[in-house]
């Protein structure tokens, strides 16, 4: 098995059909795990939309080095996910501050990040998700995308959907951070970390159905 960079187009079917969010995300770097030329999983990294997230981890000095591990989806094979993530981290530009979240609503604890030596920095802040009655099956990000580009997005949603538009308290997420760089770079990033380092959380983890059929194109290696 090897892990190599792939295009966002190659990763796209996995993001739309196999990941529970079923929506695209900003992809700056994407990597795939291949065995016998067959793609077994993908992991993607992108620049976070939120300026608060970029500065909130290690401050202004490191905001332009922040990447979010925003999608991870692979076949159910022992050690495949950790091997994919670990190999991808080694391929990222240095220095990089990598943040990722494990969604408690989906029953995720973040054991993959623990296995690849991420730092655990507690739960994300309390926030609300945008919802539309009758479309509760849609990811909150998909709902928010409907108003992208509008001047007052919340007001536009209220006019467009009326009383069917409402807010729902968002589940909090486990936040993990990883530093890519030389020993001195890692030391500087770690000293700039603005979150308290906490012990890894434990508990039962749930798996979602990721068995959707994908027509994977063979790659010549």
Image (cartoon, rainbow, N blue to C red):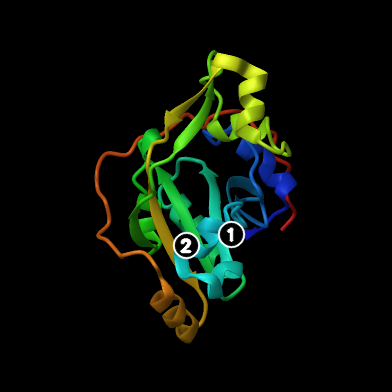
Of pointers 1 and 2, the one earlier in the residue sequence: 1
Q: Which residue is mark 1?
A: 2
Q: Please tell me which residue is depicted at 34% across the width and 59% down the height of the picture.
A: 120
Quadrant of the rendered image containing residue 118: bottom left
Q: Secondary structure at mark 1?
A: strand
Can the viewer see residue 92?
no
Verify CB contact (< 8 Å) between mark 1 and mark 2. no
Q: Please tell me which residue is depicted at 75% across the width and 54% down the height of the picture.
A: 220
Can the viewer see residue 70?
yes
The Cα atoms of the two marked residues, 1 and 2, are separated by 34 Å
Label drawn at residue 130: none
Q: Residues within 10 Å of mark 2 (few under 14, many from 20)?
A: some
Q: Position of residue 95 (x, y in %)?
A: 56, 75
Q: Nearer the viewer, mark 1 or mark 2?
A: 2
Q: Position of residue 139 (x, y in %)?
A: 54, 30
Residue that sits furthest to the bottom in the current view: 184
Q: Position of residue 6 (x, y in %)?
A: 69, 54
Question: In the displayed structure, would residue 89 be above or below residue 220?
Answer: below
Quadrant of the rendered image containing residue 205: top left
Q: Which residue is mark 2?
A: 56
Q: Residues within 10 Å of mark 1 (few under 14, many from 20)?
A: some
Classify residue 5 as left or right of residue 1.
Answer: right
Q: Position of residue 137 (x, y in %)?
A: 52, 21
Question: In the displayed structure, would residue 94 be above or below residue 168?
Answer: below
Q: Please tell me which residue is depicted at 71% across the width and 49% down the height of the picture.
A: 8
Q: Nearer the viewer, residue 130 or 18?
A: 130
């Amino acid at each position: 098995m090897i892990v190599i960079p792939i295009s966002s187009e190659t990763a796209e079917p996995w993001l739309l059909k196999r990941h529970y969010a079923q929506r695209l995300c900003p992809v700056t770097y994407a990597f795939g795990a291949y065995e016998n030329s067959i793609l077994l999983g993908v992991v993607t990294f992108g620049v976070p939309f939120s300026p608060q997230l970029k500065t909130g981890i290690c401050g202004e000095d490191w905001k332009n080095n922040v990447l979010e591990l925003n999608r991870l989806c692979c076949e159910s094979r022992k050690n495949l996910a950790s091997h994919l993530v670990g190999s991808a981290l080694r391929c990222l530009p240095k220095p990089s501050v990598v943040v990722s979240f494990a969604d408690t609503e989906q029953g995720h604890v973040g054991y993959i990040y623990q296995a690849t030596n991420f730092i655990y920095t507690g739960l994300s802040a309390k926030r609300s998700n945008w919802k539309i009655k009758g479309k509760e099956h849609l990811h909150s990000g998909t709902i928010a995308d409907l108003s992208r580009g509008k001047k007052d997005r919340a007001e536009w949603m209220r006019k467009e959907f009326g009383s069917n538009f409402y807010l729902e308290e968002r589940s909090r997420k486990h936040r993990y951070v990883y530093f890519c760089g030389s020993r001195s770079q890692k030391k500087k990033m770690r000293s700039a970390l603005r979150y308290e380092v906490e012990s890894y959380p434990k508990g039962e983890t749930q798996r979602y159905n990721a068995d959707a059929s994908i027509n994977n194109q063979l790659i010549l290696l």
